[in-house]
Amino acid sequence: MNDMTLPDKAALLRGDFRLLIGGELVPAVDGASYDDIDPATGDKLAAIPDAGPADVDRAVKAAAAAFPAWRSLPFGERHARVRSLVEILRREGDAFGMLDTLDTGNVYSGMRRDAAGGADMINYFAAAAHEIKGEVTHLDNNLHYTRREPYGVVARLLPFNHPIASFATALAAPLLTGNCVVMKPSPHSPLSALRFGELARSLLPPGVLNIVVGGNDRTAVPLINHPGVNRIGLIGSVEAGRAVMRAASDRLVPLSLELGGKNPLIVFPDADLEQAVDIAIAGMNFLWQGHSCGSTSRVLVHRSLEKRFVERLAERVGKIKVAMPTDPAAEMGAISFKALYDRCQHYLAAGRADGARLVVGGDRPADPAMQRGFFMNPAVFAEAEPAMRIAQEEIFGPIITVLGWDDYDRMMEIANGLHFGLTAVLVTDDLHVAHRTAEALQVGYVEVNGPVGFALGSPFGGYKQSGLGREGSFDELLGYTQIKSINVRMKNQAAVAASLRGGASRA
Protein backbone atom coordinates (compact mmCIF):
# COMPACT_ATOMS: atom_id res chain seq x y z
CA MET A 1 0.00 0.00 0.00
CA ASN A 2 3.03 2.33 0.13
CA ASP A 3 2.40 3.41 -3.49
CA MET A 4 -1.18 4.33 -2.63
CA THR A 5 -2.18 7.68 -4.12
CA LEU A 6 -4.55 9.62 -1.88
CA PRO A 7 -7.49 11.54 -3.36
CA ASP A 8 -7.39 15.31 -2.90
CA LYS A 9 -9.14 16.00 0.40
CA ALA A 10 -9.74 19.68 -0.34
CA ALA A 11 -11.33 18.88 -3.70
CA LEU A 12 -13.63 16.28 -2.17
CA LEU A 13 -14.86 18.71 0.46
CA ARG A 14 -15.30 21.59 -1.95
CA GLY A 15 -18.87 22.71 -2.53
CA ASP A 16 -22.03 22.18 -0.55
CA PHE A 17 -23.45 18.93 0.77
CA ARG A 18 -27.20 18.76 0.27
CA LEU A 19 -30.13 16.47 1.00
CA LEU A 20 -31.68 14.64 -1.95
CA ILE A 21 -35.48 15.01 -1.98
CA GLY A 22 -37.68 14.47 -5.01
CA GLY A 23 -34.69 14.56 -7.35
CA GLU A 24 -33.49 17.93 -6.05
CA LEU A 25 -30.43 18.77 -3.95
CA VAL A 26 -31.73 20.95 -1.14
CA PRO A 27 -30.77 22.35 2.30
CA ALA A 28 -32.96 21.76 5.33
CA VAL A 29 -36.19 23.73 5.06
CA ASP A 30 -35.43 25.68 8.24
CA GLY A 31 -31.77 26.19 7.29
CA ALA A 32 -30.49 24.04 10.15
CA SER A 33 -27.07 22.45 9.83
CA TYR A 34 -24.39 20.84 11.96
CA ASP A 35 -20.62 20.52 11.74
CA ASP A 36 -19.23 17.20 10.53
CA ILE A 37 -15.97 16.56 12.43
CA ASP A 38 -12.89 14.53 11.46
CA PRO A 39 -12.30 12.19 14.45
CA ALA A 40 -8.60 11.94 13.64
CA THR A 41 -7.91 15.66 13.84
CA GLY A 42 -10.90 17.37 15.43
CA ASP A 43 -11.17 19.59 12.33
CA LYS A 44 -14.47 20.57 10.75
CA LEU A 45 -14.99 18.76 7.48
CA ALA A 46 -18.22 20.32 6.25
CA ALA A 47 -21.53 21.86 7.25
CA ILE A 48 -24.22 19.21 6.86
CA PRO A 49 -27.94 20.04 6.46
CA ASP A 50 -29.79 18.84 9.55
CA ALA A 51 -33.06 17.46 8.24
CA GLY A 52 -36.11 18.19 10.36
CA PRO A 53 -39.69 16.87 10.33
CA ALA A 54 -40.64 19.05 7.36
CA ASP A 55 -37.76 17.64 5.29
CA VAL A 56 -38.69 14.10 6.26
CA ASP A 57 -42.28 14.75 5.27
CA ARG A 58 -41.20 16.08 1.87
CA ALA A 59 -38.96 13.06 1.30
CA VAL A 60 -41.64 10.52 2.20
CA LYS A 61 -44.23 12.28 0.04
CA ALA A 62 -41.77 12.43 -2.87
CA ALA A 63 -41.17 8.69 -2.54
CA ALA A 64 -44.91 8.01 -2.36
CA ALA A 65 -45.53 10.11 -5.47
CA ALA A 66 -42.81 8.26 -7.40
CA PHE A 67 -43.96 4.81 -6.30
CA PRO A 68 -46.82 4.06 -8.76
CA ALA A 69 -44.67 4.69 -11.84
CA TRP A 70 -41.60 2.96 -10.39
CA ARG A 71 -43.47 -0.21 -9.41
CA SER A 72 -45.16 -0.30 -12.82
CA LEU A 73 -41.90 0.02 -14.71
CA PRO A 74 -41.07 -3.23 -16.55
CA PHE A 75 -38.56 -5.16 -14.47
CA GLY A 76 -35.91 -4.98 -17.20
CA GLU A 77 -36.01 -1.18 -17.13
CA ARG A 78 -35.99 -0.97 -13.33
CA HIS A 79 -33.14 -3.49 -13.27
CA ALA A 80 -31.10 -1.38 -15.73
CA ARG A 81 -31.66 1.80 -13.70
CA VAL A 82 -30.42 0.16 -10.50
CA ARG A 83 -27.48 -1.48 -12.26
CA SER A 84 -26.42 1.94 -13.59
CA LEU A 85 -25.54 2.93 -10.01
CA VAL A 86 -22.73 0.38 -10.02
CA GLU A 87 -20.67 2.49 -12.41
CA ILE A 88 -20.69 5.40 -9.95
CA LEU A 89 -19.40 3.17 -7.16
CA ARG A 90 -16.63 1.71 -9.29
CA ARG A 91 -15.57 5.00 -10.85
CA GLU A 92 -15.60 6.98 -7.59
CA GLY A 93 -14.45 4.21 -5.24
CA ASP A 94 -11.29 5.97 -4.06
CA ALA A 95 -13.16 9.23 -3.50
CA PHE A 96 -15.91 7.52 -1.52
CA GLY A 97 -13.24 5.69 0.48
CA MET A 98 -11.53 8.95 1.39
CA LEU A 99 -14.79 10.62 2.40
CA ASP A 100 -15.57 7.64 4.62
CA THR A 101 -12.07 7.72 6.12
CA LEU A 102 -12.42 11.41 6.94
CA ASP A 103 -15.83 10.81 8.49
CA THR A 104 -15.12 7.63 10.48
CA GLY A 105 -11.40 7.59 11.26
CA ASN A 106 -11.21 4.17 9.56
CA VAL A 107 -8.00 3.31 7.72
CA TYR A 108 -8.12 4.41 4.09
CA SER A 109 -6.39 1.32 2.73
CA GLY A 110 -9.44 -0.64 3.86
CA MET A 111 -12.17 1.92 3.16
CA ARG A 112 -11.15 2.41 -0.47
CA ARG A 113 -12.48 -1.12 -1.12
CA ASP A 114 -15.93 -0.51 0.37
CA ALA A 115 -17.53 1.06 -2.69
CA ALA A 116 -16.47 -1.91 -4.81
CA GLY A 117 -18.00 -4.21 -2.22
CA GLY A 118 -21.25 -2.25 -2.43
CA ALA A 119 -21.15 -2.52 -6.23
CA ASP A 120 -20.69 -6.28 -5.99
CA MET A 121 -23.71 -6.52 -3.71
CA ILE A 122 -25.88 -4.51 -6.11
CA ASN A 123 -24.81 -6.83 -8.94
CA TYR A 124 -25.65 -9.87 -6.82
CA PHE A 125 -29.10 -8.56 -5.95
CA ALA A 126 -29.70 -7.55 -9.57
CA ALA A 127 -28.93 -11.08 -10.75
CA ALA A 128 -30.91 -12.77 -7.98
CA ALA A 129 -33.97 -10.55 -8.46
CA HIS A 130 -34.79 -12.38 -11.69
CA GLU A 131 -35.71 -15.38 -9.54
CA ILE A 132 -38.48 -13.62 -7.58
CA LYS A 133 -41.60 -15.54 -8.53
CA GLY A 134 -45.08 -16.28 -7.36
CA GLU A 135 -46.55 -19.76 -7.12
CA VAL A 136 -49.50 -21.58 -8.65
CA THR A 137 -51.32 -23.97 -6.32
CA HIS A 138 -53.71 -26.75 -7.30
CA LEU A 139 -56.10 -26.87 -4.37
CA ASP A 140 -59.24 -27.62 -6.41
CA ASN A 141 -60.53 -26.96 -9.93
CA ASN A 142 -60.03 -23.20 -9.57
CA LEU A 143 -56.84 -21.25 -10.30
CA HIS A 144 -54.89 -20.11 -7.26
CA TYR A 145 -51.70 -18.08 -7.69
CA THR A 146 -49.55 -15.63 -5.74
CA ARG A 147 -47.73 -12.42 -6.59
CA ARG A 148 -44.89 -10.73 -4.77
CA GLU A 149 -45.50 -7.01 -4.63
CA PRO A 150 -43.57 -4.05 -3.17
CA TYR A 151 -44.54 -2.33 0.07
CA GLY A 152 -44.31 1.23 -1.22
CA VAL A 153 -42.14 3.68 0.72
CA VAL A 154 -39.22 2.07 2.55
CA ALA A 155 -37.16 3.85 5.21
CA ARG A 156 -33.61 2.56 5.73
CA LEU A 157 -31.58 3.75 8.72
CA LEU A 158 -27.86 3.11 8.30
CA PRO A 159 -24.83 2.66 10.59
CA PHE A 160 -21.78 4.89 10.80
CA ASN A 161 -19.02 2.31 10.37
CA HIS A 162 -19.12 1.45 6.64
CA PRO A 163 -21.03 4.36 5.12
CA ILE A 164 -20.88 3.81 1.35
CA ALA A 165 -20.94 0.01 1.55
CA SER A 166 -23.99 0.07 3.81
CA PHE A 167 -25.70 2.67 1.64
CA ALA A 168 -25.20 0.80 -1.63
CA THR A 169 -26.22 -2.53 -0.14
CA ALA A 170 -29.29 -1.10 1.58
CA LEU A 171 -30.80 0.54 -1.49
CA ALA A 172 -30.50 -2.43 -3.88
CA ALA A 173 -33.15 -4.85 -2.60
CA PRO A 174 -35.92 -2.27 -2.03
CA LEU A 175 -35.42 -0.57 -5.40
CA LEU A 176 -35.18 -3.78 -7.42
CA THR A 177 -38.42 -5.05 -5.93
CA GLY A 178 -40.28 -1.88 -6.89
CA ASN A 179 -40.18 0.14 -3.68
CA CYS A 180 -39.06 3.75 -3.33
CA VAL A 181 -36.69 4.61 -0.51
CA VAL A 182 -35.85 7.28 2.00
CA MET A 183 -32.27 6.65 3.14
CA LYS A 184 -31.04 8.00 6.45
CA PRO A 185 -27.25 7.75 6.80
CA SER A 186 -25.66 8.14 10.22
CA PRO A 187 -25.15 11.78 11.21
CA HIS A 188 -21.58 10.79 12.14
CA SER A 189 -20.70 9.75 8.57
CA PRO A 190 -22.95 11.43 5.98
CA LEU A 191 -20.45 12.60 3.38
CA SER A 192 -20.28 9.66 0.98
CA ALA A 193 -24.05 9.14 0.96
CA LEU A 194 -24.74 12.78 0.16
CA ARG A 195 -22.10 12.78 -2.56
CA PHE A 196 -23.59 9.58 -3.98
CA GLY A 197 -26.99 11.25 -4.11
CA GLU A 198 -25.51 14.14 -6.05
CA LEU A 199 -24.00 11.77 -8.64
CA ALA A 200 -26.91 9.33 -8.85
CA ARG A 201 -29.93 11.62 -8.99
CA SER A 202 -29.96 11.80 -12.80
CA LEU A 203 -30.00 8.00 -13.11
CA LEU A 204 -33.24 7.40 -11.21
CA PRO A 205 -36.67 9.04 -11.58
CA PRO A 206 -37.20 11.88 -9.06
CA GLY A 207 -38.39 10.62 -5.70
CA VAL A 208 -37.31 7.01 -6.15
CA LEU A 209 -34.23 7.65 -4.00
CA ASN A 210 -34.28 10.29 -1.25
CA ILE A 211 -31.56 11.01 1.31
CA VAL A 212 -32.06 12.81 4.62
CA VAL A 213 -29.47 13.25 7.36
CA GLY A 214 -29.77 14.34 10.97
CA GLY A 215 -30.04 13.26 14.57
CA ASN A 216 -32.60 11.06 16.28
CA ASP A 217 -35.10 13.69 17.38
CA ARG A 218 -35.07 15.80 14.21
CA THR A 219 -34.78 13.07 11.58
CA ALA A 220 -34.99 9.44 12.73
CA VAL A 221 -38.08 9.70 14.94
CA PRO A 222 -40.18 11.64 12.40
CA LEU A 223 -39.13 9.18 9.69
CA ILE A 224 -40.01 6.07 11.71
CA ASN A 225 -43.33 7.59 12.80
CA HIS A 226 -44.34 8.96 9.41
CA PRO A 227 -47.68 7.49 8.31
CA GLY A 228 -46.43 7.26 4.71
CA VAL A 229 -43.63 4.79 5.54
CA ASN A 230 -44.68 1.22 4.80
CA ARG A 231 -41.50 -0.73 5.64
CA ILE A 232 -38.45 -0.03 7.83
CA GLY A 233 -34.94 -1.48 7.80
CA LEU A 234 -32.37 -0.63 10.48
CA ILE A 235 -28.71 -1.51 10.92
CA GLY A 236 -27.64 -0.38 14.37
CA SER A 237 -27.39 -1.14 18.05
CA VAL A 238 -29.77 -3.26 20.11
CA GLU A 239 -30.92 -0.09 21.86
CA ALA A 240 -31.73 1.54 18.52
CA GLY A 241 -33.54 -1.61 17.42
CA ARG A 242 -35.75 -1.57 20.50
CA ALA A 243 -36.63 2.09 19.93
CA VAL A 244 -37.48 1.52 16.27
CA MET A 245 -39.56 -1.55 17.09
CA ARG A 246 -41.53 0.34 19.74
CA ALA A 247 -42.25 3.17 17.33
CA ALA A 248 -43.17 0.85 14.47
CA SER A 249 -45.54 -1.13 16.67
CA ASP A 250 -48.11 1.68 16.76
CA ARG A 251 -48.80 1.19 13.04
CA LEU A 252 -47.61 -2.44 12.83
CA VAL A 253 -45.02 -1.46 10.21
CA PRO A 254 -43.01 -4.47 8.96
CA LEU A 255 -39.34 -4.11 9.80
CA SER A 256 -35.97 -5.82 9.68
CA LEU A 257 -33.27 -5.22 12.28
CA GLU A 258 -29.57 -6.05 11.91
CA LEU A 259 -28.29 -5.29 15.40
CA GLY A 260 -25.29 -5.78 17.65
CA GLY A 261 -23.32 -8.75 18.90
CA LYS A 262 -20.88 -9.92 21.53
CA ASN A 263 -19.54 -12.59 19.28
CA PRO A 264 -17.58 -15.59 20.58
CA LEU A 265 -14.40 -16.91 18.99
CA ILE A 266 -14.09 -20.45 20.32
CA VAL A 267 -10.59 -21.99 20.25
CA PHE A 268 -10.60 -25.76 20.72
CA PRO A 269 -7.67 -27.77 22.15
CA ASP A 270 -6.66 -29.15 18.74
CA ALA A 271 -6.42 -25.68 17.20
CA ASP A 272 -3.22 -24.46 15.58
CA LEU A 273 -2.07 -21.65 17.88
CA GLU A 274 -0.82 -19.30 15.18
CA GLN A 275 -3.92 -19.83 13.09
CA ALA A 276 -6.11 -19.07 16.10
CA VAL A 277 -4.20 -15.84 16.81
CA ASP A 278 -4.38 -14.84 13.14
CA ILE A 279 -8.15 -15.34 13.19
CA ALA A 280 -8.50 -13.41 16.45
CA ILE A 281 -6.62 -10.45 14.96
CA ALA A 282 -8.47 -10.51 11.62
CA GLY A 283 -11.81 -11.05 13.32
CA MET A 284 -11.55 -7.84 15.34
CA ASN A 285 -11.50 -5.65 12.22
CA PHE A 286 -8.85 -3.30 13.53
CA LEU A 287 -8.76 -1.41 10.20
CA TRP A 288 -12.01 0.11 11.43
CA GLN A 289 -11.13 0.04 15.15
CA GLY A 290 -13.32 -2.94 15.97
CA HIS A 291 -16.40 -0.90 15.01
CA SER A 292 -18.19 -3.92 13.58
CA CYS A 293 -21.24 -5.87 14.70
CA GLY A 294 -19.50 -9.07 13.57
CA SER A 295 -16.22 -8.55 15.47
CA THR A 296 -15.25 -11.53 17.62
CA SER A 297 -14.43 -9.55 20.75
CA ARG A 298 -15.12 -12.43 23.18
CA VAL A 299 -12.50 -15.20 22.88
CA LEU A 300 -13.19 -18.53 24.60
CA VAL A 301 -9.90 -20.44 24.50
CA HIS A 302 -9.26 -23.92 25.89
CA ARG A 303 -7.15 -23.88 29.07
CA SER A 304 -4.48 -26.05 27.44
CA LEU A 305 -3.74 -23.20 25.02
CA GLU A 306 -4.80 -20.22 27.09
CA LYS A 307 -1.45 -19.02 28.44
CA ARG A 308 0.39 -19.30 25.13
CA PHE A 309 -2.57 -17.87 23.22
CA VAL A 310 -2.77 -14.79 25.46
CA GLU A 311 0.97 -14.20 25.25
CA ARG A 312 1.02 -14.47 21.48
CA LEU A 313 -2.17 -12.43 21.03
CA ALA A 314 -0.84 -9.65 23.27
CA GLU A 315 2.42 -9.62 21.38
CA ARG A 316 0.64 -9.27 18.04
CA VAL A 317 -1.92 -6.71 19.23
CA GLY A 318 0.85 -4.65 20.81
CA LYS A 319 2.51 -4.33 17.39
CA ILE A 320 -0.59 -3.07 15.57
CA LYS A 321 0.34 0.28 14.10
CA VAL A 322 -2.13 2.93 15.23
CA ALA A 323 -1.64 5.91 12.95
CA MET A 324 -3.39 8.65 11.06
CA PRO A 325 -6.00 6.90 8.92
CA THR A 326 -4.44 8.06 5.65
CA ASP A 327 -1.00 6.69 6.57
CA PRO A 328 -0.29 3.81 4.13
CA ALA A 329 1.25 1.83 6.99
CA ALA A 330 -1.70 2.33 9.36
CA GLU A 331 -3.33 -0.83 10.75
CA MET A 332 -5.82 1.05 12.93
CA GLY A 333 -7.14 4.60 12.89
CA ALA A 334 -9.19 6.83 15.20
CA ILE A 335 -12.30 5.95 17.20
CA SER A 336 -15.13 7.34 15.09
CA PHE A 337 -16.65 9.88 17.48
CA LYS A 338 -16.27 11.14 21.03
CA ALA A 339 -19.17 9.29 22.61
CA LEU A 340 -17.76 6.01 21.30
CA TYR A 341 -14.26 6.91 22.48
CA ASP A 342 -15.67 7.63 25.93
CA ARG A 343 -17.51 4.29 25.81
CA CYS A 344 -14.24 2.47 25.15
CA GLN A 345 -12.60 4.28 28.06
CA HIS A 346 -15.53 3.29 30.29
CA TYR A 347 -15.05 -0.40 29.48
CA LEU A 348 -11.30 -0.22 30.01
CA ALA A 349 -12.02 1.08 33.52
CA ALA A 350 -14.79 -1.50 34.04
CA GLY A 351 -12.50 -4.36 33.06
CA ARG A 352 -9.88 -3.31 35.55
CA ALA A 353 -12.45 -2.68 38.28
CA ASP A 354 -14.05 -6.10 37.79
CA GLY A 355 -10.71 -7.87 38.15
CA ALA A 356 -9.68 -8.76 34.61
CA ARG A 357 -6.02 -8.35 33.70
CA LEU A 358 -5.24 -5.73 31.05
CA VAL A 359 -2.43 -7.44 29.19
CA VAL A 360 -1.72 -4.81 26.57
CA GLY A 361 -3.00 -1.52 25.18
CA GLY A 362 -5.76 0.84 26.19
CA ASP A 363 -3.44 3.84 26.37
CA ARG A 364 -3.09 6.75 23.95
CA PRO A 365 -0.41 6.57 21.23
CA ALA A 366 2.54 8.84 21.89
CA ASP A 367 2.69 10.33 18.38
CA PRO A 368 2.13 14.11 18.68
CA ALA A 369 0.17 14.07 15.41
CA MET A 370 -2.55 12.02 17.09
CA GLN A 371 -3.10 14.04 20.22
CA ARG A 372 -6.11 15.97 18.92
CA GLY A 373 -7.95 12.89 17.66
CA PHE A 374 -9.80 10.01 19.32
CA PHE A 375 -6.93 7.52 19.29
CA MET A 376 -6.24 4.58 21.59
CA ASN A 377 -4.06 1.51 21.34
CA PRO A 378 -6.02 -1.74 20.94
CA ALA A 379 -6.41 -3.65 24.20
CA VAL A 380 -6.52 -7.28 25.39
CA PHE A 381 -8.01 -8.37 28.71
CA ALA A 382 -7.19 -11.84 30.06
CA GLU A 383 -8.35 -13.85 33.08
CA ALA A 384 -11.86 -12.54 32.59
CA GLU A 385 -14.99 -14.12 34.04
CA PRO A 386 -18.28 -14.57 32.15
CA ALA A 387 -20.22 -12.20 34.42
CA MET A 388 -17.85 -9.25 33.87
CA ARG A 389 -19.19 -6.32 31.89
CA ILE A 390 -16.42 -6.61 29.31
CA ALA A 391 -17.55 -10.20 28.68
CA GLN A 392 -21.26 -9.40 28.62
CA GLU A 393 -21.76 -6.09 26.83
CA GLU A 394 -21.01 -4.93 23.31
CA ILE A 395 -18.19 -2.38 23.38
CA PHE A 396 -17.96 -1.72 19.61
CA GLY A 397 -14.32 -0.82 19.93
CA PRO A 398 -10.81 -2.34 19.80
CA ILE A 399 -10.98 -4.33 23.05
CA ILE A 400 -10.66 -8.14 23.18
CA THR A 401 -11.75 -10.14 26.23
CA VAL A 402 -10.24 -13.62 26.70
CA LEU A 403 -11.92 -16.29 28.83
CA GLY A 404 -10.53 -19.77 29.50
CA TRP A 405 -12.55 -23.00 29.44
CA ASP A 406 -11.99 -26.70 29.98
CA ASP A 407 -15.53 -28.13 29.99
CA TYR A 408 -17.39 -28.20 26.67
CA ASP A 409 -20.89 -27.99 28.09
CA ARG A 410 -20.00 -25.09 30.37
CA MET A 411 -18.26 -23.33 27.47
CA MET A 412 -21.44 -23.63 25.40
CA GLU A 413 -23.48 -22.18 28.25
CA ILE A 414 -21.15 -19.18 28.27
CA ALA A 415 -21.18 -18.84 24.49
CA ASN A 416 -24.99 -18.91 24.38
CA GLY A 417 -25.54 -17.10 27.66
CA LEU A 418 -26.03 -13.57 26.37
CA HIS A 419 -29.03 -11.88 24.79
CA PHE A 420 -26.90 -11.40 21.66
CA GLY A 421 -26.79 -14.00 18.90
CA LEU A 422 -25.19 -12.56 15.78
CA THR A 423 -22.00 -14.43 14.81
CA ALA A 424 -19.54 -16.99 16.12
CA VAL A 425 -16.19 -18.36 14.94
CA LEU A 426 -14.81 -21.84 15.64
CA VAL A 427 -11.16 -22.86 15.36
CA THR A 428 -10.76 -26.65 15.16
CA ASP A 429 -9.71 -29.40 12.76
CA ASP A 430 -12.28 -31.82 14.20
CA LEU A 431 -15.14 -31.94 11.71
CA HIS A 432 -17.52 -33.57 14.20
CA VAL A 433 -16.84 -30.92 16.84
CA ALA A 434 -17.25 -28.12 14.28
CA HIS A 435 -20.66 -29.33 13.08
CA ARG A 436 -21.89 -30.24 16.55
CA THR A 437 -20.95 -26.82 17.91
CA ALA A 438 -22.25 -24.85 14.93
CA GLU A 439 -25.66 -26.48 15.33
CA ALA A 440 -25.75 -25.80 19.08
CA LEU A 441 -24.74 -22.13 18.90
CA GLN A 442 -27.64 -19.68 19.16
CA VAL A 443 -26.36 -17.32 16.49
CA GLY A 444 -27.32 -16.48 12.95
CA TYR A 445 -23.90 -16.84 11.29
CA VAL A 446 -21.08 -19.30 12.08
CA GLU A 447 -17.62 -19.31 10.50
CA VAL A 448 -15.24 -22.25 10.87
CA ASN A 449 -11.46 -21.67 10.78
CA GLY A 450 -11.59 -18.07 9.61
CA PRO A 451 -12.88 -14.62 10.58
CA VAL A 452 -16.50 -13.82 9.73
CA GLY A 453 -16.43 -13.56 5.96
CA PHE A 454 -19.82 -12.16 4.90
CA ALA A 455 -19.84 -14.45 1.87
CA LEU A 456 -21.81 -12.89 -0.99
CA GLY A 457 -25.28 -14.38 -1.02
CA SER A 458 -25.07 -15.97 2.44
CA PRO A 459 -27.92 -14.81 4.71
CA PHE A 460 -26.60 -12.55 7.45
CA GLY A 461 -28.54 -11.69 10.59
CA GLY A 462 -28.98 -12.57 14.23
CA TYR A 463 -30.81 -14.70 16.72
CA LYS A 464 -32.32 -13.32 19.92
CA GLN A 465 -31.76 -9.58 20.35
CA SER A 466 -29.24 -9.39 17.53
CA GLY A 467 -32.00 -8.81 15.05
CA LEU A 468 -34.89 -9.81 12.85
CA GLY A 469 -34.63 -10.86 9.22
CA ARG A 470 -31.65 -11.61 7.00
CA GLU A 471 -29.54 -9.41 4.75
CA GLY A 472 -27.06 -9.85 1.92
CA SER A 473 -28.99 -12.71 0.33
CA PHE A 474 -32.11 -13.70 -1.58
CA ASP A 475 -33.93 -13.54 1.76
CA GLU A 476 -33.38 -9.77 1.79
CA LEU A 477 -34.94 -9.36 -1.63
CA LEU A 478 -38.00 -11.34 -0.56
CA GLY A 479 -38.13 -9.28 2.64
CA TYR A 480 -39.00 -6.17 0.61
CA THR A 481 -41.98 -7.86 -1.00
CA GLN A 482 -45.36 -8.90 0.37
CA ILE A 483 -47.40 -11.85 -0.91
CA LYS A 484 -50.80 -11.46 -2.52
CA SER A 485 -52.96 -14.55 -3.13
CA ILE A 486 -55.35 -14.50 -6.10
CA ASN A 487 -58.14 -17.03 -6.65
CA VAL A 488 -59.86 -17.29 -10.04
CA ARG A 489 -63.11 -19.28 -10.01
CA MET A 490 -63.30 -21.46 -13.10
CA LYS A 491 -66.52 -22.55 -14.75
CA ASN A 492 -67.21 -26.28 -14.62
CA GLN A 493 -66.92 -28.32 -17.80
CA ALA A 494 -70.67 -28.40 -18.45
CA ALA A 495 -70.88 -24.63 -18.23
CA VAL A 496 -67.91 -24.25 -20.57
CA ALA A 497 -69.46 -26.65 -23.07
CA ALA A 498 -72.80 -24.83 -22.91
CA SER A 499 -71.05 -21.53 -23.42
CA LEU A 500 -69.26 -22.86 -26.47
CA ARG A 501 -72.49 -24.26 -27.93
CA GLY A 502 -74.17 -20.95 -27.38
CA GLY A 503 -71.35 -19.20 -29.11
CA ALA A 504 -71.57 -21.54 -32.07
CA SER A 505 -75.34 -21.04 -32.49
CA ARG A 506 -74.96 -17.27 -32.38
CA ALA A 507 -72.33 -17.52 -35.05
Image (tube, helix red, strand yellow):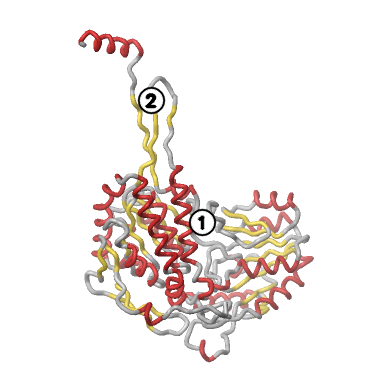
The quadrant in which the N terminus is found is bottom right
Residue 20, picture quadrant: bottom left
Camera-nearest residue between 326 and 490: 326
Taking the spot 60% from the left edge, 52% from the top edge, the residue there is: 442
Camera-nearest residue between 332 and 404: 332
* Circle 2 SS class: strand
Residue 108 image offset from top left, x and y in percent: 50, 75
Taking the spot 46% from the left edge, 42% from the top edge, the residue there is: 131
Distance from the alpha carbon under mark 1 to that under mark 2: 41 Å
> Mark 1: which amino acid?
Gln
Residue 11, picture quadrant: bottom left
Looking at the picture, does residue 301 appear above or below residue 71? below
Of labels 1 and 2, the one closer to you? 2
* 161 lies left or right of 154: right
Q: Which residue lies furthest to the bottom in this view?
A: 368
The quadrant in which the C terminus is found is top left
Q: Which mark is residue 318?
A: none
Residue 440 image offset from top left, x and y in percent: 65, 50
Q: Which mark is residue 143?
A: 2
Taking the spot 38% from the left edge, 22% from the top edge, the residue there is: 142
Looking at the picture, does residue 215 appear above or below residue 492? below
Camera-nearest residue between 64 and 259: 64
Which tag, 1 or 2, sits closer to the chain's start? 2
* Circle 1 SS class: helix
> Mark 2: which amino acid?
Leu
Asked if the residue under mark 2 is in contact with the one under mark 1, i.e. CB atoms within 8 Å, the reply is: no
Residue 191 image offset from top left, x and y in percent: 38, 72
Circle 1 residue = 465
Camera-nearest residue between 502 and 362: 502
Say if residue 262 shows up in the picture.
yes
At label 1, counting other C-alpha atoms closer than 10 Å, the crowd grade (few under 14, some 14-19, many 20 or more) is many
Looking at the picture, does residue 403 appear above or below residue 441? below
